[in-house]
Image: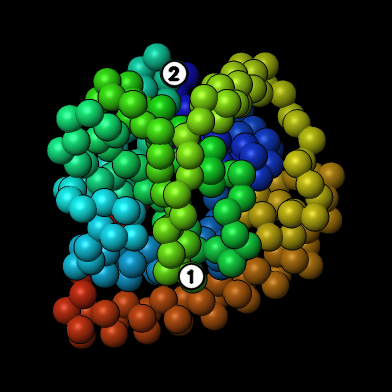
Amino acid sequence: MEIRATDLKQFVFCPRYIYFTYVQPVPKVPTLKMIQGRVEHIEHQNKERRRGLRSYNLVEGARHFHYPVYAERLGLRGKVDLVIETKSSSGQRYFPIECKNTNRGIRNNIVYQLVAYALALEEMTNSPVHLGYIYLLPEKKAYPIPITQARKQHVKRMITMIRHIVENEYFPEPRSRARCATCELQRYCNDLDTSSTWNEKQKFFEEFNELWNGRCSRMKQEGTTIDTEARS
């Protein structure tokens, strides 16, 4: 079975996401935060095309947006927000970059997603990837993330654990019940009380729909490209 790089991010957040994706698939309703993140990604990508590479400590390089990666040996695939390809003949040539809309800093879930992309890039290009970047949209800042051997090994272990859940149809405990209130899958966990929070989320979706439509309309008037391609 193939694992998506985003599965690793979700597994770190809560392993039940894996269960409800592969063992007992259910419709996924995006959270308010997810929808807002997509809007921010669209705006950032259009700005990124016009910027230099100083944020990534690079002098030259070609940008590849929504870059598909695949590691056959690991059974891992995904789509990187941005890969910068340099002409270096002795050092690292490919730099994976993930953009995140979060005010909570850099958490392990997005670090391991980036490491998964690095592993796939290494296999695809037969060249080492020792460094990647996480760009935090609220801060408008790129943070260097070392792609260490220890992190690579941990990602491989997580892939094994994800396969264990799927192959054995194992229903895991939630990572932290404090996270359940904002989870898009909370209504499917029958050991949680979700009725009140679901009504509140529905209200949020309606309010944000107005924001989304208004912002898209303004972007079209300004002649800005709206790229709604699905990310993996």
Q: Position of residue 87 (x, y in %)?
A: 15, 38
Residue for badge 1? 139
Q: Which of 169 and 51 is in front in this view?
A: 51
Which quadrant of the structure image shows residue 99?
A: bottom left
Q: Residue at x 25, y 46 (%)?
A: 84
- Mark in the foreground, 1 or 2: 1
Q: Which residue appears at 32% of the width and 41% of the height?
A: 95
Write the residue at 45% across / 81% down.
211
Residue 74 is labelled as 2
Position above or below: 105 against 124: below
Q: Position of residue 162 (x, y in %)?
A: 60, 25
From mark 1 to mark 2, how far is it between C-alphas?
A: 34 Å
First in residue order: circle 1 vs circle 2 = 2
Q: Position of residue 173 (x, y in %)?
A: 79, 35
- Residue 206 can be seen, yes or no: yes
- Quadrant of the rendered image containing residue 96: top left
Q: Quadrant of the C terminus?
A: top left
Q: Nearer the viewer, residue 104 or 56?
A: 56
Q: Is residue 23 above or below residue 184?
A: above
User: Type of residue at label 1?
Assistant: Glu
Q: Give the label on residue 90, or none.
A: none
For the point 26% across and 51% down, the residue is 58
Toward which corner of the image does residue 39 lie, by quadrant?
Answer: bottom left
Residue 25 visible in the shown view: no
How busy is the neighbourhood of tag 2: few (under 14 within 10 Å), some, or many (20 plus)?
some
Instruction: Please state which amino acid type lies under the numbered disc 2.
Output: Leu
